[in-house]
Image (cartoon, helix red, strand yellow):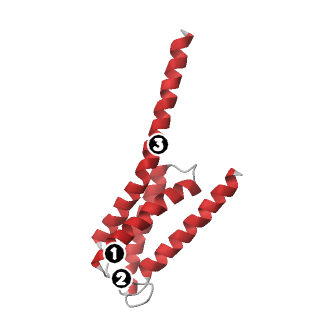
Amino acid sequence: MIRIFQALFALCFVSALGLFAALALAPPGTDLGVFANNPNDKFGHFLAFFLLGPLAVAAFPRVRIIWIALTLAVIGAGLEAAQSLTGREISAEDMAANILGLVAGMFPLLAYRLRLALNRRAAKRDVLANDT
């Protein structure tokens, strides 16, 4: 059952990544490029990576979060670089919005995993203290 959910999350992740890539690479003036070269597109970049991070973690739970974050950051940089091929501008602000969205989306997951690790450590300490 868990593998079915992982497969569904993987499908959602790949679909969302494809959609965001299509939106990011759409030339200005097309229906898909509604945010092309618009100063207000930072929220779109933030939101895309805010959603992609947790989706990727749900799709690939055995992969460390740091590797998922680094991979998504490289994908974001690649999309920014590829925008120059479609008549759009490469923007450091867009990349910053990507990274901030990724960090904001991953933060609750990191905090939860840290809490679990600390609880396991405390439980292990209690077991060791009771054995003596």
Which residue, given by chain and number where applicable, does mark 1 sit on? 41
Find residue 112 and name its label: 3
Q: Secondary structure at mark 2?
A: loop
Q: Secondary structure at mark 3?
A: helix
Residue sitting nearer the eye, 114 or 31: 31
**Which mark sits nearer the N-terminus, 1 or 2?**
2
Say what amino acid the circle numbered 1 marks: Asp
Residue 74: x, y in percent? 42, 64
Residue 26: x, y in percent? 43, 84
Q: Residues within 10 Å of mark 1 (few under 14, many from 20)?
A: some
Residue farthest toward the right in the current orientation of the protein: 1
Q: Residues within 10 Å of mark 2 (few under 14, many from 20)?
A: many
Say what amino acid the circle numbered 3 marks: Tyr
**Which mark sits nearer the N-terminus, 1 or 3?**
1
Image height of 108 relative to 30, above or below: above
Q: Residues within 10 Å of mark 3 (few under 14, many from 20)?
A: few
Contact (Cβ within 8 Å) of mark 1 with mark 3: no
Find residue 36 and name its label: 2
Contact (Cβ within 8 Å) of mark 2 with mark 3: no
Contact (Cβ within 8 Å) of mark 1 with mark 2: yes
